Image: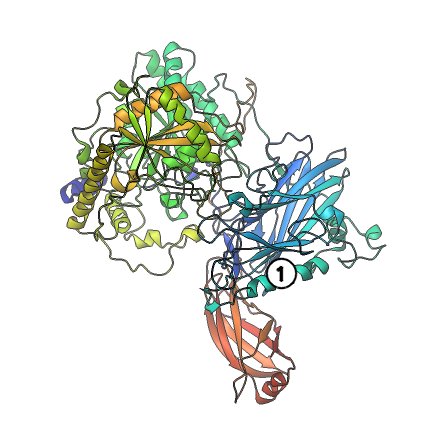
Amino acid sequence: MTNINKARSARRWTARRAIPSLAAAALAAGTLATVSPAAAYNYVPAGEGDRWGVHDAANPGLDTGSVRDTTGNALQGYGGLRVEVEGGKSRLNGILLRGFGLTYDGRETFTSTRGVDVDGVVVRRELVVPAGQSYGRFFDTFTNTTRKPVTVRVAFGGQVGYATGENQSELSATGDGDDAITAADGWASWHTPTAAAGGPSQNGPSATVFGTPGEADALEKVGTFLLDPFDNPLPADGDAANHPGFVTTLTIEPGDTESLLRYVVTGMPEGRAVGGSTRPAGSEVAKVESLAATLAGLPAVEGLTLSELCSVENFDPAALGLAGADCAKAPQVPFAGGAAGSVSAETAATTSSYDVVGKTLTELAADLKAGRTTSQQIVRAYLDRIAAYDQGPFGLHSVITVAPDAMAQARAADKARKAGDKRPLLGIPVLAKDIIDTKDMPTTGGSLVFDGYQPKEDAFQVELMREAGAIILGKANLAEFANDGHYSPNAFGATWNAFDPSRSPIGSSGGSAVAVASSFAAAAWGTQTGDSLWGPAGAASLYSLRGTDGMQSSAGTMPLTLIQDYVGWIGQSIEDLATLLDVTAVDNPDDVLDDVANGHRPTDWSATLKPGALKGKVIGVPETAFDDPFGTSEVSDALKAQFANFEKAGATIKVVPDFTDVPTRGDYGDTGYEGWAQWIDAHPDNPYTLPEQITHNELRVPYQRRAGEYTGTGRMTEQQQRDFEAYRATYRENIAAWMDEHGADAILYPAELSEIHLNDSINPSFGRKDPQSSAAGVPTVIFPAGTTENGNPVGFQLQGKAFQDAELMGFAYAFDKVAQGRVLPAWTPPLRYDADAVPPPVVDVDPLPEPQPTKLRLTVLDRSVKATLPRRGKARVTLAVGCASVGAACTGTVKVTLGGKRIATSKVRVAAGGQRTITIALPAKATTKVRKGKKVTLKVAFTGTGRTVSSTPVKVTVRR
């Protein structure tokens, strides 16, 4: 008996389930891995205790140069670029631009290591967040590498609020004091006012400085950065109002470079304690606006060369310190060869004559049976599409690893078919979410924590699919350890939306859905603990089933929440789901948690798929189910218009009260900890022995890493596990009683309720209202229902009673026959067929070393501080000390001198990217000077220990 089988037997005996791992993984194992895992998204200290999290090329590798978040929550994915070249045909035209190879110097600067070529215009970025200052300087250059003048529209912006609670942003002020943002302003600011006295800003205010006030080239318009900012004006309210985009038009001569210089100023929240301080209403807003006005009139240009300054189009030369003749003699050295090493989104040809785009699994099987194609042609087509659309800096990053012998498996399937093999899925390629065990490929959970780890056996469902003849083509990308229901970021590159590659694909099964929608595989496993099947499937115009608890075994899957986790399919049709469930919805004798479904699994999932399945049925719609938490109506209006198709199919739509009979939840212990403990038991060859070594590991995505030591309750008892199952059973009974009371055969819920936010932002990424399926373990079938007027997919969920799974699929099938709701993404069209082409290979990529600065530095965050003056005695000064580091802490000694004499020495240890304060007493003479309103200047030097370097003294001004 193998170790795995022993562990499975032990699990059966103890009534536990082991939950294996999601892949992100060992690119060395397959013929593919989309993006190399870099290692740490970087935080940079700003002024007054703030810090900015910047999307550089490090883990999770969004590489947009935008600011994901700040300590004060002033920005939520801001400072991104959209570039539209007139007459351009590049796939990059108009999307949130990425792929700059931005690297952090460990102090204050993020620099492009390569340009991004958009139809011959090469774009480079630099972001500087000066130490101790509350602003960042964005310097973007645009080089015309073509032989003709080029007109380029550039949008700069992102998200400054979100429409929940008191987080809705409002325009606070403009440069000239009115409510219209024009070139005359030079800057504009936003805040999130609350109902408290004085209207304090719930989140930190922000301002964008876009040019010299009155400079005609500084601003053309302000659009909605969430949608198309070039054609959609920024509204005054609603969710879209949180996404300003500053649009500028440039006309660039052949060989020339023009640049745009912008500043973003941030503040801290008002009226609530953040960073140890509570700031009065209006104080931070005033501070931000004062600094913005200063930068608009006198931009900070330290470090920019004469050539760079002369290329700036949105500031008056005099404001930049340029005299009339300066630019005539400016050398072009910084821009010579500026396009060298740039990357563009080129599309290769395919060597497969069979077009797989939009082909369902059912259609593939029919074509294979009829001899219209071969498994080799199908696999080759998928591999070519992955190479063309999924890899590289502009890829969708939906696939982490491809099976090293994928083509060999296809050849073997074709040979078996010729020999008379009639297995239902012979030669059909599918993907497994990379937390599901595959013995021939790594399973990483999308994390460097398990980089290269390869389990010795397949997960239960994977084993069943192989027995049915399927090819496990590769591992799908995901949110690290399935830990995010809004995005899908991890160390191997964040996944992007298949329909709009500026937006989130939703999480955590984003890679599975994007890969299937983009025709990289026929179907893919996903998992769901909250929304991770219905969210990604809805966003990708696909189909899925979160079955009743136990309908499919989760054995062999890395956990998030024991018992609540569900491993299910994301497919291209209801028929596809039925075929896949015929194979995988069977009892696992080694998994006690799937026993609840024994005796309830259909033997033929296609039996209920009839066009008349909805006739005479009552579809209940909860009263508030279609009310978007963001307050928008575009998506809900599109969905409500589809109610007519239910009626056309013979159903009655009935409004019912919202479900409220949620059972009281007991103390069931730490379900996440127990899940990992059982997974470790079942994987004795894995590198870890305790769950906290995984969940608190410093190799995790920085903003998903759990800080500090584990302080939870540890493993669940047997009784707690059984009580949790009983709680869910009661929940299911209450749902059935609610449906019966209101005469509903099924309950209708939406998938997403709003436009999905951009991929560089923070939670929440969409208007979300969960049905009860995950919390209770009742089934929901997910299916598409067309698009919004913006062309983005919308979808439904039909929820039912326990073990109503097959009937719900019949309802969805009947609706689908009428509505024909599925749409295909335009961003990944069919590849051009060329029998002689040599498509780019799907290559192995090794993980990169962690991109932290080789030297750690201690810094003084504020160069001007106020002294605390007691009635008697010496003045005291508090200095904020920061650590410029990605992962390791900074250590050393702080030495403070005044007039050449040492007045204080202190040993410090500061966490990576963090700060701490030290307080010193001024000498009597210096105290007297400050009392009289005069300033004194201290010199602060650091003597580093370990990897922390020593520094030359910096001056700090002390004032009253």
- The image's colouring method is rainbow
Give the side of residue 135 with respect to residue 603, left or right. right
Give the side of residue 744 with respect to residue 195, left or right. left
Asked whether residue 30 appears in the rendered view, the answer is no
- The residue nearer to you, when weighing 823 against 604, is 823
Residue 313: percent from left, percent from top: 74, 48
User: Looking at the picture, which amino acid does disc 1 mark?
Assistant: Glu
Residue 449: percent from left, percent from top: 38, 49
- The residue nearer to you, when weighing 422 against 748, is 748
Q: Write the residue at 52% across / 28% down.
A: 828
In the picture shown, does residue 823 fall above or below 870? above
Which quadrant of the figure contains the C terminus?
A: bottom right
Name the outermost residue toward the top.
370
Dot 1: element: helix
* Residue underneath mark 1: 289
Asked whether residue 434 appears in the rendered view, the answer is yes
Which quadrant of the figure contains the N terminus?
A: top left
